[in-house]
Image (cartoon, rainbow, N blue to C red):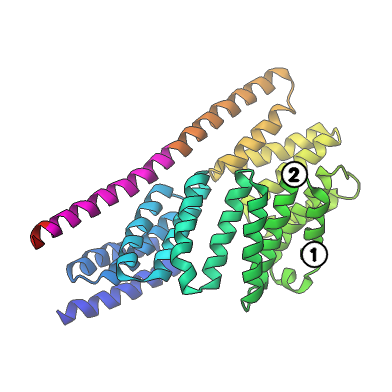
Amino acid sequence: NSDDVLKNKALSQYVKYYYRTKDWNQFHKYRKEQLKLSQKIDDSASYAKVLEYSGAYFMKHNIPDSAYYYYNESFKIYALLGDSLRAGKTLLNNAIIQKNVSDYVGSEATSFMALSYLLPTKNERRISSVYNNLGIVYNQLGDFDNAIKYHQLALDLRNDISNSQLYALHSLNNIAKVYADNKNYDTAIGYYKQILNSDSILQTNRLFYAVVLDNYTYARFKKGELRSIEHLFKKALSIREEGEVTDGIIISCIHLAEYYKEKNNYPLALKYAQRAEQLSDSIRNYRDFLASLELMSSLYETEEAKTVFQKYIRIRDSLDRQSLNFRDQFARIRFESEEKENLIQDQRNNILN
């Protein structure tokens, strides 16, 4: 009835508004209401949209399996409705979720599936995001040629899109990181300098400036330059502290700990490593938590080092298990939804026959 249609439209606005204002109690209240109502009145587009918002909420709050489930449900409806752009977008989000939990092979497959929906839409921004994700995935898999290839594809598109200079610089930073990870520090430093010369963009994006400055300094450090870099590491850290970017502060602390260790200043190295460990534990950033534990185990005297190293091994093993669990859960979500689809299809066929 028309009242329900109007109410559903209003609920859509509420869900969107409370998501943007981060009022999560109200968001969940209206989200659940709209899921029920849009199903009742058979409004598939609204139902898919509220599923997508649910996925976005769980992704934002770092609950990967729930986020993956909602995006997957949302994708199926968009695909049935023939909405290629939104179907591709939800697949892109799932590819990013898989990458974030180290399911790189799964992320690669989902990325190519996303491309099959997005390429016909010619939406360069979303397509460039898929290429970007593939670049990161291939870098993690140690496939440097493909990593460079996809980051370059993302960069070419981002150079074409208006108001995308910042995204283009992000791609340059990612290309530089691939070279740095491959120990080709001179090439990496060349790219970082190119970004640091884009002064006007960096002035308005101080946090990105801190990322590039820290990456540039770290590449110089890894190359063996120890002179005149300490103040650059500290400058990047202070910008990150001003912006209260915990992830960034952790990276800066790990880099400073490595620097002071190299300079044989063990007390300072330990101070920064401990700060990185405490911060990464507080936000459940286990990758950097491991990195800081590994560093600490090389800085302590023998008995303490042994204790820290045992903790490192224990956490690394449980992280590997967690990553495998997520992979299994994602596969189960896909499998169960395919089973359900097949069942519905069989029932339809029986009715038709």
Q: Secondary structure at mark 1?
A: helix
* Total labels drawn: 2
How crowded is the residue under tag 2: few (<14 C-alpha within 10 Å), some, or many (20+)? many
Return the residue found at the far front.
Answer: 353
Q: Position of residue 19 (x, y in %)?
A: 41, 66
The answer to whether residue 193 is above or below residue 201 is above
- Residue type (three-letter) at the residue carrying disc 2: His
User: Magenta residues: mostly which secondary structure?
Assistant: helix
Q: Is residue 72 visible?
A: yes
Q: Is residue 263 toward the left or the right of residue 191 in the image?
A: right
Asked if marks 2 and 1 touch (Cβ < 8 Å), the reply is: no
Q: Position of residue 88 (x, y in %)?
A: 43, 64
Quarter of the image for residue 81 reads: bottom left
Please name whichever residue, 203 or 268, is drawn nearer the observer in this view of the structure: 203
Disc on res. 255 = 2
Disc on res. 194 = 1
Real-space CA distance between mark 2 and mark 1, rounded to the nearest whole angstrom: 22 Å
Quarter placement of the N terminus: bottom left
Q: Which residues are magenta?
A: 325-349
Q: Is residue 196 toward the left or the right of residue 317 in the image?
A: right
Q: Residue at x 62, y 79 (%)?
A: 162
Query: Is residue 326 magenta-colored?
Result: yes
Q: Residue at x 68, y 47 (%)?
A: 251
- Residue type (three-letter) at the residue carrying disc 1: Gln
The answer to whether residue 290 is above or below residue 237 is above
